[in-house]
Amino acid sequence: MASKPQHESVADLCNLFKLLSDPTRLEILMQLSQGEFTVTDICESLNLPQPTVSHHLGLLRMGHCIVNKRNGKTVIYSLSETSKGTKNSLRFIVGGSSVTLSDLA
């Protein structure tokens, strides 16, 4: 399989950094590193309204950082296959590169 041209990989990394530059999105990712959560769970833990959380979840999903699945009417969010997390770190695989954020608290 051919690798992406370098400019596409750089663009992918820039898009990831744009997503990570927002404190709300970073907090959502940190929460999802602990498991699966619904929009309601995330709203309650971050003390934010549902439209705000849904907006950020949509951006993270379009950026391939998270995935969702349905359980009846409930939508459950988790980190994607290219995003891994622990209690204190997040790791993303983007365009053949790895980005790790560590010592998160």
Image (spheres, rainbow, N blue to C red):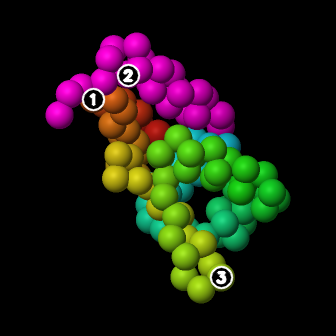
Q: Is residue 27 above or below residue 13?
A: below
Start and end of the magenta stretch? 1-23
* Residue type highlighted by circle 3: Lys
Q: Residue furthest front?
A: 2
* Residue type highlighted by circle 1: Gly
Give how far across and how far down residue 75 sits, in percent: 60, 72
Mark 1 and mark 3: span between their CA atoms? 36 Å
Sequence-wise first label, 3 or 2:
2
Residue bearing the label numbered 3: 73
Sequence-wise first label, 1 or 3:
3
Residue bearing the label numbered 1: 96
* Residue at (34% x, 29% y) in the render: 95
* Residue at (34% x, 53% y) in the render: 81
Q: Residue furthest left?
A: 1
On screen, residue 60 versus residue 5, left or right, reads right
* Residue type highlighted by circle 2: Ser
Q: Secondary structure under badge 3?
A: loop
Count every numbered label the image shows and give the total. Answer: 3
Quarter residue 9 falls in:
top left
Q: Does residue 97 appear in the picture of this structure?
A: no
Q: Secondary structure under badge 2?
A: helix
For label 2, the crowd category at 10 Å Cα-Cα, with few meaning under 14, some 14 to 19 and many 20 or more, is some
Residue 9 image label: 2
Mark 3 and mark 2: span between their CA atoms? 36 Å
